[in-house]
Amino acid sequence: MTKRDLVVRISEETSLVQQQVLEVVQKTLDYIAEAVANGTKVELRNFGVFEVKIRKARVGRNPNAPEADVRIPPRAVVKFKPGKEMREAVLKLTPKEDAQPPAQPKP
């Protein structure tokens, strides 16, 4: 789903002009992004939480030169933790396991 899809759907359901809906959706996203960029946790009940976490420094490896270690510095990243309703809805997408166990490879 794109922002455009969201605007069209809200516009159809509320009978508001698409341009007005677009402005509201864009302002909402702008305020969320601004708050997260300032390090503020954004909590939207029944949807989820956006927050900034600091990743620790670590040592990585270049696959093209595995003998050389590469230092990866600490960095701030945005984390999203889905709310209970979203988490439960997504869990319903989990594929069911087959009744038969997977075939074992022959030696």
Image (cartoon, rainbow, N blue to C red):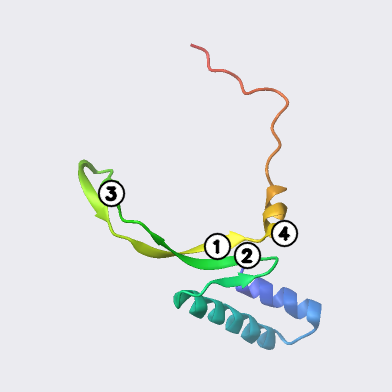
| Sequence-earlier tag: 4 or 2 | 2
Element assignment for label 2: strand
Report the Cα–Cα distance between label 4 and label 3.
Answer: 37 Å
Do callouts 4 and 1 mark residues in contact (Cβ within 8 Å)? no
Q: What residue is shown with label 4?
A: 85
Q: What residue is shown with label 3?
A: 59
Do callouts 2 and 1 mark residues in contact (Cβ within 8 Å)? yes
Amino acid at pointer 1: Phe
Quarter of the image where one finds residue 18 = bottom right
Element assignment for label 1: strand
Quarter of the image where one finds residue 104 = top right
| Sequence-earlier tag: 3 or 1 | 3
Disc number at residue 48?
A: 2
Q: Is residue 71 left or right of residue 89?
A: left
Do callouts 3 and 1 mark residues in contact (Cβ within 8 Å)? no
Report the Cα–Cα distance between label 4 and label 2.
Answer: 9 Å
Report the Cα–Cα distance between label 3 and label 2.
Answer: 31 Å
Give the percent coordinates (x, y) of residue 22.
Answer: 64, 83
Give the percent coordinates (x, y) of residue 87.
Answer: 67, 55
Element assignment for label 3: strand
Element assignment for label 4: helix
Disc number at residue 80?
A: 1
Amino acid at pointer 2: Gly
| Sequence-earlier tag: 3 or 2 | 2
| Sequence-earlier tag: 4 or 1 | 1
Q: Residue at x 62, y 86 (%)?
A: 23
Q: Residue at x 29, y 48 (%)?
A: 60
Give the percent coordinates (x, y) of residue 103.
Answer: 60, 20
